[in-house]
Amino acid sequence: MKGFSVRKLNGSDGYRSVIAGCLTAVLLSACGGNSEQQVREEAVAAATAKTAVKVQKVTEQPVEQLIELTGNIQAFKSNDIATTVPGRIIDIFAEVGDRVQKGQKLVQMDRSNLLQATIQLQNAERELARVDTLFRLGSATQQQLDQLTTQVDVAREALRHLEENTTLLSPIDGVVTIRNFDPKNIYPGAPAILNVQQISPVKVLIGISETYFPRVKEGMAVKVRLDVYPDKLFEGKIAIVYPTINQTSRTFTAEVTIPNSDTMLRPGMFARVELNFGTMMHVVAPDMAVIKQVGTNNRYVFVVENGVAYQKKVEIGRRDGTNYELLSGVENGASVVVAGQSKLLDGTKVTVTN
């Protein structure tokens, strides 16, 4: 073209020079004509900018030392009604759900063995009386008298055993929960014919961390909540503290008893047992400040000191509303970040905006 001269460039170096020149022109145009000095200043400003955060000062407060443990409601006592002598069941006098009293007749077994044992005892007693008379007259030996005395004692014990296993009585006040046989069935020896459970009171067995072992005492009051009754609170107490620690779980067992006069609580219900160990002074922080580390159970907060945010690992206790009890990691009076944590790393410079 006229008025336009083209200088031939030799080799690849020439082509690279042309391309570099074009790119430089484009970049300068895109930057609106900004000079190199302006770009450098903007980069420095970005590198030294401080992250804006909001903080809240934390303080020590009295915190109730509550722990919640779970377990299942159990009958206070549970008795299987069965006989140790297999035989025919003549009659059963209770159905599942019936309330029974201690000493109430529940099952009648066949009496044939009992009658036979009664006759044997009567015969042995008559023979003992006869030999005793002869012994007094000098016509029987001490050995004969001793042998018959032993036979009578054995026969009496056998009769007593059969009496207990022929007419079966309830050993407790309770409710029938299981019935496995019907009248006229042959009882083979297992399972139990009936099961009777005492459900007033009831109990819950809970496993407690060994760290609390010195502080858990018999008679200690507890609160019990059940999911099935979300609006009701039940009172109970520690009745038994088991004396050993489980080496695997590092827990010990305690038995909680709960009055149940209205029988609202039934065996098998899920229960939450709350123990109160009084109050302790601990730092309390808003839940917004506590961050859970992904993939772990570790939790941490950012504490601002002299314009710098430091990451602090914390051990949390109980949650109360929107606050966490901090057992360790943060000192009283520290300023913790409650907004803007997502932009922070340990040692980030910050500007407090509240």
Image: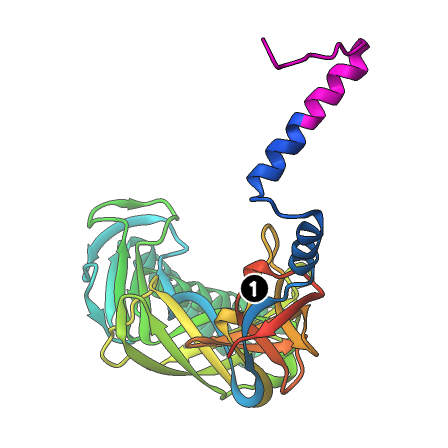
In the rendered view, does 40 fall on the left or right side of 86?
right
Vertical side of 212 occupied by 2: above or below = above
* Amino acid type, callout 1: Gln
Mark 1 packing: few (<14 Cα in 10 Å), some, or many (20+)?
many
- Which quadrant of the structure image shows residue 252? bottom right
Vertical side of 37 occupied by 240: above or below = below
- Residue at (56, 44) in percent of width and height: 32
Q: Position of residue 316 (x, y in %)?
A: 58, 72
Labels in figure, total: 1
Can the viewer see residue 149 in this picture? no
- Residue at (37, 65) in percent of width and height: 79
Q: Nearer the viewer, residue 37 or 206?
A: 37
Q: Nearer the viewer, residue 2 or 229?
A: 2
In the rendered view, does 284 fall on the left or right side of 72?
right
Can the viewer see residue 353 in this picture? yes
Q: Position of residue 288 (x, y in %)?
A: 49, 70
In the rendered view, does 91 fall on the left or right side of 147?
left
Q: Is residue 15 magenta?
A: yes
Q: Position of residue 5 (x, y in %)?
A: 67, 13
- Which quadrant of the structure image shows residue 93? bottom left
Q: Is residue 69 magenta?
A: no
Q: How is the image coloured?
A: rainbow
Q: Position of residue 183 (x, y in %)?
A: 19, 50
* Magenta residue span: 1-21
Residue furthest to the front in view is: 3
Q: Quadrant of the N terminus?
A: top right
Give the residue number, with chain letter if any, for mark 1: 341
Vertical side of 56 occupied by 246: above or below = above
- Which quadrant of the structure image shows residue 74? bottom left
Element type where label 1 sits in the image: helix
Q: Nearer the viewer, residue 99 or 228?
A: 228
